[in-house]
Amino acid sequence: MTRHPADDAGTSPEPAVDEPVARPKPKPKPKRKRSFVRELPVLLAIALGLALVIKALVIQSFFIPSGSMENTLQPGDRVLVNKAVYHLRDIKRGEVVVFNGENSFNGALPAVEAATDGAFARAFASVAHWFGASAPGEKDYIKRVIGLPGDRVTCCDAQGRISVNGVSLDENAYLFPGDRPSLEPFDIVVPKDRLWVMGDHRSVSQDSRAHLGQPGGGTVPIDKVVGRAFVIVWPLSRAGTLSIPDTFSQPGLSGSGSARG
């Protein structure tokens, strides 16, 4: 039997399904814009705090005012000094170090200055002093380590060279052109916990030789070493690392010398 539309007239229609109602999204709250002027002092304080920590514990810049280390270092050079390295390993012969010469280098002209030129640097130095991390004073020197504790350092052999533990040093790579290793003869055994240091410009350097009659016999206490000068950063034309000359790697040179900073 054929069904007609009329036959379904009594059939209940299917219930309509309600469509979900789209609710308006809440408007995001406008972000509060912080004033850069208000943030700037905080940023500066953080930067200054980090700089103080780095300066006090790890790296410091020094200015070279004299010619005692020419031509390795020249007046006007700026070097970075690693102040942490000797807490991790021994001092090595041939390294260039900054040290405080108070009570050991009395009367000598300072050979290095903390780089604090400029208004910001002067302000930084004042804050550093307030926090107990002030810049080094007028007794800081920069020299090359020639002898370690226990080393016998003598001058001169038949060819006019300095010897360490009986091994002659070939210093042509770093001595100032025309300079002799030393005009003054000496023969010293470096005491415990001290260093024998010399400038590369021997004819003008007031180094260990010039202080033989002072406490320590011209040697420097290891605990007065500020750190190792490891790189020249200014001027850019002279930028480069301060490596240990090859002559200090000669067999037999080591002897009994050992130095812990």
Image (cartoon, rainbow, N blue to C red):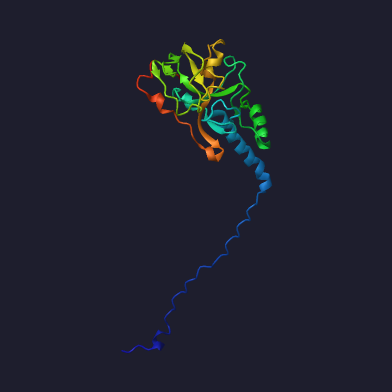
Residue 137 versus residue 20 in the image, above or below: above
Frontmost residue, 97 versus 71: 71
Q: Is residue 191 visible?
A: no
Q: Quadrant of residue 165?
A: top left
Please tell me which residue is depicted at 58% across the width and 30% down the height of the picture.
64
> Residue most toward the left?
1
Residue 167 versus residue 20 in the image, above or below: above
Q: Quadrant of residue 76?
A: top right
Please tell me which residue is depicted at 49% across the width and 17% down the height of the picture.
196
Please tell me which residue is depicted at 64% across the width and 40% down the height of the picture.
44
Q: How many marks?
A: 0
Frontmost residue, 162 versus 145: 162
Residue 19 versus residue 186 in the image, above or below: below
Q: Position of residue 39 (x, y in %)?
A: 65, 44
Q: Position of residue 130 (x, y in %)?
A: 66, 27
Q: Is residue 228 visible?
A: yes
Q: In the displayed structure, does residue 4 sit left or right of residue 45?
A: left
Frontmost residue, 57 versus 184: 184
Please tell me which residue is depicted at 67% across the width and 33% down the height of the picture.
122
Frontmost residue, 171 versus 91: 171
Q: Quadrant of residue 12?
A: bottom left
- Quadrant for the N terminus, please: bottom left
Q: Position of residue 243 (x, y in %)?
A: 45, 31
